[in-house]
Image (cartoon, rainbow, N blue to C red):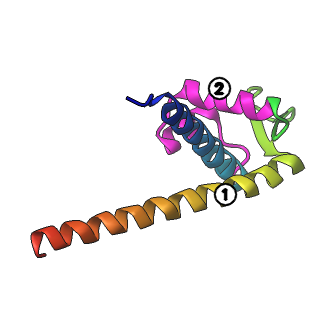
Amino acid sequence: MPSTQPNTVKRKTQLQEDVHFWVMRRLQETSDINQRELARELGISLGSVNYCLQALMEKGWVKMQNFSKSKNKLGYAYLLTPLGIAEKSALTKRFLKRKLEEYEALREEIEALKKETDW
């Protein structure tokens, strides 16, 4: 019986890449969003957002900027770096390719089910 480990690892990598894509996409739209709002909007935990942002900053794709003139001293902006913008573009292409493949597989499954049920 073949191991499912490679598929599990591949799926976890894809999920992580999807979270990176959605976080980077949202940050490009609104850099001054806080982690709690980001977690709520994306439907993921606050810890996952924090972990993701730390990973993106370590890779040099996102930088954090403090608003020193802000009344809220905890006010931060998360900005995509030039490297981050390039990587977001690559992530977008991979995300779109994968979603189109999923769509095609789902379309084929729907057609097969329609034939089975004479729908």
What is the x, y in percent for residue 28?
Answer: 73, 53
What is the x, y in percent for residue 19?
Answer: 59, 41
Placement of the C terminus among the 4 image quadrants: bottom left
Q: CA distance from mark 1 to mark 2?
A: 21 Å
Q: Which residues are magenta?
A: 30-57
Report whether 7 appears left or right of 85. left
Label 1, residues with CA under 10 Å away: few <14, some 14-19, many ≥20? some
Q: Residue 15 occupies which quadrant of the picture?
A: top right
Report whether 54 appears left or right of 13. right
- Secondary-structure class at tag 2: helix
- Residue at (72%, 43%) from the top-left corner? 32
Q: Nearer the viewer, residue 21 or 106?
A: 106
Predominant SS along the magenta part? helix
- Secondary-structure class at tag 1: helix
Q: Residue 114 occupies which quadrant of the picture?
A: bottom left
Look at label 1 and name its amino acid: Thr
Q: From this viewpoint, is residue 75 visible?
A: no
Query: What residue would you read off at disc 1?
Result: 92
What is the x, y in percent for residue 57?
Answer: 80, 32
Report whether 72 appears left or right of 94. right
Q: Residue furthest bottom?
A: 119
Query: What residue would you read off at disc 2?
Result: 51
- Residue at (36%, 62%) from the top-left corner? 106
Q: Residue 59 occupies which quadrant of the picture?
A: top right
Q: Is 88 within the magenta?
A: no
What is the x, y in percent for residue 63?
Answer: 83, 37
- Residue at (50%, 62%) from the top-left corner? 101
Which one is earlier in the sequence, the residue at label 1 or at label 2? 2
Look at label 2 and name its amino acid: Tyr
Q: Is residue 117 above or below residue 22?
A: below
Label 2, residues with CA under 10 Å away: few <14, some 14-19, many ≥20? few
- Residue at (42%, 31%) from the top-left corner? 2
